[in-house]
Amino acid sequence: MKDEQPVEEQAAQLPADPEAYDSPRGVQARARGLAAPYIAGGTDPDPETGRREERRYLVILLVMVVVIVLSGFVLGYLAQLVGLQS
């Protein structure tokens, strides 16, 4: 395994980026007391694609819930017909 440099040394080797320092994310990170301008999340370049995918997954989830609930009724009805329940 190769030896890795500490994060402080790696950061010292990188050139300063004034645009990143003044970016909204950098300002928010400094306001929260973070050492680096990284805040989880961010701006999505194409949010409509993500929303479309989320809607599709929501429909799939709802269909799965309906199938599971209805299958319980169907299995109960079939068990009653066969006489498995007393």
Image (cartoon, rainbow, N blue to C red):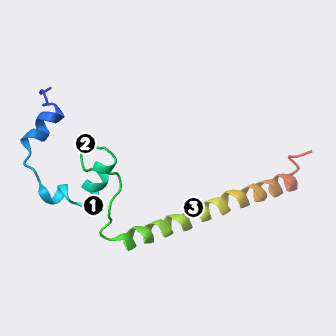
Amino acid beneath label 3: Leu
Residue 79 at x, y percent in the picture = 82, 52
At a point 27% along the width and 60% down the height, the residue shown is: 24
Specify few, some or many for label 1: CA neighbours under 10 Å numbering under 14, 14-19, or 20 or more. Answer: few
Of 22 and 6, which appears nearest the observer? 22
Number of the front mark, 2 or 3: 2
Figure quadrant of residue 48: bottom left
Residue 86 at x, y percent in the picture = 92, 44
Could you tell which of marks 2 and 3 lies nearer the N-terminus?
2
Tell me if residue 66 comes above or below residue 26 in the rendering. Answer: below
Of 52 and 15, which appears nearest the observer? 15
Specify few, some or many for label 3: CA neighbours under 10 Å numbering under 14, 14-19, or 20 or more. Answer: few
* SS at mark 2 in the image: loop
Q: Which residue is mark 1?
A: 24
Residue 82 at x, y percent in the picture = 85, 52
Amino acid beneath label 2: Ala
* SS at mark 1 in the image: helix
At a point 33% along the width and 59% down the height, the residue shown is: 42
Q: Residue furthest front?
A: 31
At a point 81% along the width and 56% down the height, the residue shown is: 78
Q: Which residue is mark 2?
A: 35
Task: Report, in whole angstroms, how far the alpha carbon at label 3 lies from the one at label 1.
Answer: 36 Å
Residue 60 at x, y percent in the picture = 55, 64
Q: Which residue is mark 3?
A: 61
Number of the front mark, 3 or 1: 1
